[in-house]
Image: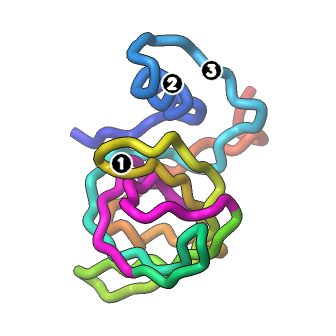
Amino acid sequence: MENTCTPGQIDVVAVAAEDGAMSEVVSATPRRSARAFRKVRIQAQGRTHDRKRFKETCETVVVSVHGGLLLLKHEVDNGETLVLTNPLTQEEQECRVVYLGEPLEKGQRVGIEFLTPAPRFWGIEFQSEPSASNIN
């Protein structure tokens, strides 16, 4: 059974994980694609907040056609460009940091957005969502 989220569901999970309580967050913008809770080991490279180059192997928490949520040991700035490499396929994708969680013992949750959608980068199939024109 595939663990996919409906648009907006990841917001609820993120809040629950941070404060330990379930509280619903309504996203101001609709999600562009379905999300899947999936641990995928990838390599991330870029620059830290103090501009030093880094390369590390990390894991995803949530993935989508348009990006994902990573757990990074290096601290990066919002808006920073990273290059992700899937070690199974050697495919590379450039992405932009769009969310920074609080630094934790395991690392920092970092939300990334691909510069171009990459539906096959994570190695899973995403369900297509109905468009607004198909909804009654």
- Pointer 2: what residue? 15
Marks 2 & 3, CB-CB < 8 Å contact = yes
Q: Which mark is residue 61?
A: 1
The CA distance from mark 2 to mark 3 is 8 Å
Q: What residue appears at the point 44 percent right and 21 percent down from the top-left corner?
A: 16
- Pointer 3: what residue? 25
Q: Amino acid at mark 1?
A: Val
Single out the mark in the foreground, 2 or 3.
Answer: 2
Please state the horizontal and vertical placement of residue 109, each as a whole percent of the image. Answer: 45, 48
Secondary structure under badge 1?
strand
Can you say whether 33 is above or below 16 in the image? below
Q: What residue appears at the point 45 percent right and 85 percent down from the top-left corner?
A: 92
- Chain-order first, disc 2 or disc 3: 2
Quadrant containing the C terminus is top right
Segment colored magenta: 55-78
Most foreground residue, 103 or 130: 103
Secondary structure under badge 2?
helix
Q: Dot 3, crowdedness within 10 Å: few (<14), some or many (≥20)?
A: some
